[in-house]
Amino acid sequence: MVSKPFVHDAANSGEEREMPIFALENPVFLTYLIASAIMVLKVMGQGWMTVYRMMKINGGYASPEDLKTGLINKSPSPSQLEVNEYVDRSRRMHRNDLENVPAFWIAGLLFVLVDPAVWLAQILMYGFVLARLAHFWAYATKRTHEVRATFYTLGSIIVIYLAGHALWVATM
């Protein structure tokens, strides 16, 4: 069982020393921090992209209360609630992020706790970021489902591996 709140570091000085798992000096945690921060910006940015698109076309709204007169919507119209592909594509991309990225945050943190090799953490975590950015590109540029699904699958396999690896180490 993994029970120590420290990891061993021999890479920097050549001498083995203990350091806290959740410290910037731990390269595995630093990798997780960078990948997670990029994913936070991606998820939040996608939400703002959807808002931008709704404002740009003055439509594609999702809720009946969006038709109330306000500072932004000065002339509400029932047509504003109609599905608009330009807005809805961004909304679907955001929903896809919300279905996938939180699992990475959790599995990635569990992975950090079991003190994996730095190279493995970097390949997997940065690989997830690249897979999600490629998925965004494929969705935004209207590539085929097969292209989009390939990038989704890569990211999904990485998250499954992160969680499986953590579970394996924790139970051994």
Image (tube, rainbow, N blue to C red):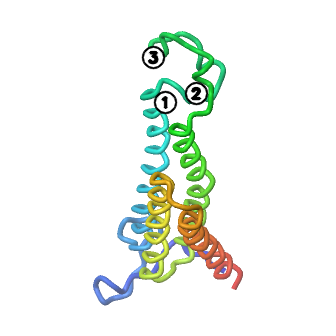
The residue labelled by disc 2 is 61
Disc 3 residue crowd, few under 14, some 14–19, many 20+, Cα 10 Å: few
Label number found at residue 159: none
Q: Which residue sits furthest left?
A: 13
Task: Give the x, y percent position of residue 54.
Answer: 49, 30
Q: Is 103 on the left or on the right of 30, as rendered?
A: right
Spatial CA distance of label 3 from label 1 is 11 Å
Cα–Cα gap, marks 1 and 2: 7 Å
Looking at the image, which residue is at 44% across and 77% down? 123
Residue marked by disc 3: 72
Tell me if label 1 and label 2 are in contact, CB under 8 Å: yes
Q: Report the amino acid beneath label 2.
A: Tyr
Local crowd size for mark 2, using a 10 Å CA cut-off: few (<14), some (14–19), many (≥20): many
Residue 11: image quadrant is: bottom left
Query: Few, some or many C-alpha atoms within 10 Å of disc 1 (few <14, some 14-19, many ≥20)?
Result: many
Look at the numbered discs 3 and 2 and tell me whether their residues touch, using CB distance below 8 Å.
no
How far separated are the C-alphas under marks 3 and 2?
Answer: 12 Å
Q: Amino acid at mark 3?
A: Ile
Relative to 85, is 135 above or below?
A: below
Q: Quadrant of the N terminus?
A: bottom right
Q: Position of residue 38 (x, y in %)?
A: 41, 56
- The residue type indicated by label 1 comes to Met
Callout 1: SS: helix
Judged by depth in the image, the label closer to the viewer, 3 or 1, is 1
Q: Which residue is mark 1?
A: 54
Where does residue 119 sit, x and y in percent of width and height? 42, 82
The vertical placement of 104 against 113, above or below, is above
- Residue 153 in picture, x, y percent from top left: 60, 70
Of 79 and 148, the residue lying toward us: 79
Does 118 sit left or right of 65 as displayed? left
